[in-house]
Image (spheres, rainbow, N blue to C red):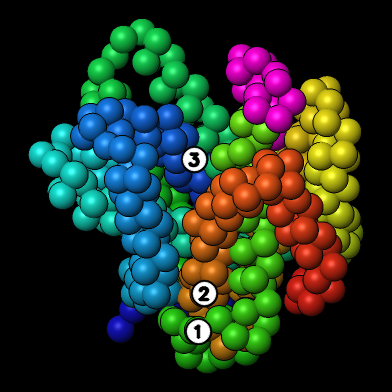
Amino acid sequence: MTSTTTFTDDTAPSPTRMALARHATRVLFLALGVVAGTWGAHVASVKARYALSDATLSIALLAAAIGAVLSLFVAGRFVGRLGARRGAALAAGGTCLMLAVVLELGSFVALVPAMLCFGAATSLFDVAINTEGSELESLGGRAIMSNLHGMFSVGGMLGAALAALLLGAGVAPGLQLAAVAVGTAAVAWVASRGMLETHAPAAGSERPAHFVWPRGALLVIGLLILAGMTAEGVMYDWCVLYLKQDLGVPQARAAIGYAAFAAAMALARFGGDALRSRYSERSVLRCSAALAAVAMAVVLLARHETVALVGFALVGAGLAPVAPILFNAATRVPGASRAAAIASVTSIGYSGLMIGPPLVGSIATASSLTAALVVVVLASALLAACARFVPEQAR
């Protein structure tokens, strides 16, 4: 027996209960973003603590990515058995525990399994709260997924900014991670109490599967998420280097490129739900992805600092609706629970974060970084062209 029961007309949550659940889920997305931003700011701390070369650091980072992908095979059953509420609380606790100890391990040999666990816990946390967000959107009849992903983006910026502030103040990295982990775990536990205790069944299935291999519509959606995450990962990892290396922009100004991309993505996500409420998701996805493709093409052709900064912001705005639309679309494919559908497409999509940056590095080595960043143009154009295959939401 699982802890997840279903709603009937008599047991459907009240408007007040729905509002509480929405606020709680926003906080949880913010908490996950804070963890991601804090971790990103302290990758260099891990490298210094264990005296790692670039090659050995990449092994540790790959372990986290492998843990994230492998956990997706059990994510549907994990959320199905515990419910999104308890699943989110447990996964958040595991994520924060790993964050707290990552600089306190004895050696690189101990770091690798810890990173595997960190990636797995983070992935389960991600699936649990996305499942809750999709459920709230379905029950409430209003678009909220873009807003939730916007909260994640804000959390990422807050985590990175806090880390930079504390590093500037001379606070030890280990103490920073422990403090952020304890605070985030406490916030996540309190917020999880506001989540729904019950979930509706998946469409078209009395006994939805808790694990499904991505095929048919789920495979298409997964491949589109792969394209979107590839483009997003490339922008995060390479846009600053492009400004500095190919355009000769000083590093202090080149960092503005990263900020422009990330800030525009966050702002666009907060406005994305209004677009999804007014226009079809296919239209929003098609137009936004086309905007990203055209903007990046102009950046690479113009080779001008100002054009690049504006273009990076437009790419961020164009890619912003991709994840909210596609994650939610996956839950409308019959035959699987919401958590299983999200885990299925995410298992493909996460590969984009692993494939994109090394792919660009290889092309840049063989040719140039400008040529390599055409990957963003191609991935965005693929999203625009294939938007018509995304299952449409009932209006």
- Quadrant for residue 342, please give it: bottom right
Residue at (62% x, 50% y) in the render = 366
Type of amino acid at the residue the image marks with label 2: Ser
Real-space CA distance between mark 2 and mark 1, rounded to the nearest whole angstrom: 6 Å
Q: Is residue 288 magenta?
A: no
- Quadrant for residue 119, please give it: bottom left
Q: Which residue is farthest left?
A: 106
Q: Residues within 10 Å of mark 2 (few under 14, many from 20)?
A: many
Residue hosting label 3: 33
Real-space CA distance between mark 3 and mark 2, rounded to the nearest whole angstrom: 22 Å
Residue 344, label in figure: 2
Span of residues in magenta: 243-261
Nearest the viewer among 82 and 221 is 221
The location of residue 362, given as percent across then percent down, is 57, 52
Residue 323 shown left or right of residue 212 in the figure: right
- Quadrant for residue 57, please give it: top left
Real-space CA distance between mark 1 and mark 3, rounded to the nearest whole angstrom: 28 Å
Type of amino acid at the residue the image marks with label 3: Gly
Of circles 1 and 3, the one toward us is 1
Residue 336, compared with residue 353, is above or below; it is below
